[in-house]
Image (cartoon, coloured by chain):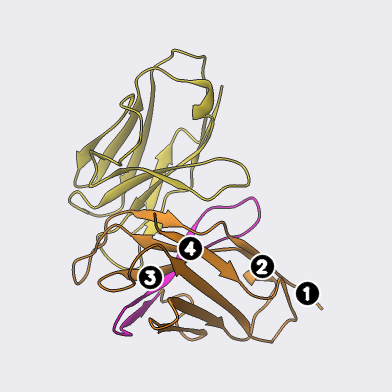
Chain colours: A orange, B yellow
Amino acid sequence: QVQLQESGPGLVKPSETLSLTCTVSGGSMSNYYWSWVRQPPGKGLEWIGYIYADGYTNYSPSLESRVVMSIDTSKNQFSLKLTSVTAADTALYYCARPKSCTNISCWGLDYWGQGILVTVSS
Amino acid sequence: IQMSQSPSSVSASVGDRVTITCRASQGIRSWLSWYLQKPGKAPQLLIYAASSLESGVPLRFSGAGSGTDFTLTISSLQPEDFGTYYCQQGSTFPFTFGPGTKVDI
């Protein structure tokens, strides 16, 4: 059974960088597009982007200038960095895995972490 | 691609048939998934490829549609089905979610 677990600071100051790591257990990282999704308190879901096992990335255009994802398959981990954060970046951040993807399309997210609340505040 | 859902909320009784509609702003073929999110929990995948039931999901859930118009139907609502339902398109990145439909029992 694949399990995902987010880790990182729960509080980040405005203008600083949000850094999160997702640790994957119970399965291989190969051949999957590992994703980050966020949800502001009381609001809907936003797919931030994904990273493939070989390091290929695709980021949402609304966040592309501030997002960097990386992957370390030897540690079974992938990471998210979001720079220059503001209060609008306060959200529950989930790491997740789509069932499968072609080169441009993906089926649904079948495995999710429990989520980590990141608050941007001084 | 913008996703819309209707209704935004629904109150129903145990045993009721409930249908939620999702519409995409452009054609997405069958790249449509449905999720249920309960308070304080991560979303749970119910349906993928518009009509394929995810493993372990009860048979009372079904999905239909292709192109721009899709439906999720719960044939006989159960107490554990309360929560917010989201549709999501996986056709073209950035993949986008609908605004959600809150189901109260």
Discs 3, 2: same chain: yes
Q: Dot 3, how many residues are within 10 Å of its Cα: few (below 14), some (14-19), or many (20+)?
A: many
Q: Distance between the residues labelled 4 and 1?
A: 27 Å
- Three-letter code, disc 2: Thr
Q: How far apart are marks 2 and 1 (CA)?
A: 9 Å
Which dot, 1 or 3, sits closer to the camera?
3
Chain of the residue displaying label 1: A
Magenta span: A38-59
Question: Mark 4 or mark 2, which has the lower sequence index?
Answer: 4
Q: Would you say B99 lies left or right of A119 here?
A: left
Q: Dot 1, how many residues are within 10 Å of its Cα: few (below 14), some (14-19), or many (20+)?
A: few
Q: Position of residue B105 (x, y in %)?
A: 56, 21
- Three-letter code, disc 3: Trp
Question: Mark 1 or mark 3, which has the lower sequence index?
Answer: 3
SS assignment at label 3:
strand
Chain of the residue displaying label 3: A
User: Which residue position is annotated with label 4?
Assistant: A4
Discs 2, 1: same chain: yes
SS assignment at label 1:
loop
**Marks 4 and 3: in contact by CB < 8 Å?**
no
Q: Dot 4, how many residues are within 10 Å of its Cα: few (below 14), some (14-19), or many (20+)?
A: many
Question: Mark 3 or mark 2, which has the lower sequence index?
Answer: 3
Q: Residue at x 30, y 26 (%)?
A: B59
Q: Where is residue B76 in the image (x, y as percent from the top left)?
A: 39, 17
Q: Position of residue A15 (x, y in %)?
A: 69, 86
Question: A11 or A21, which lies in front?
Answer: A21
Question: A32 or B25, which lies in front?
Answer: A32
Occupied quadrant, residue A69: bottom left
Q: In this view, does B72 lie above or below A20?
A: above
User: Which residue position is annotated with label 3?
Assistant: A34
User: Which residue position is annotated with label 2?
Assistant: A90
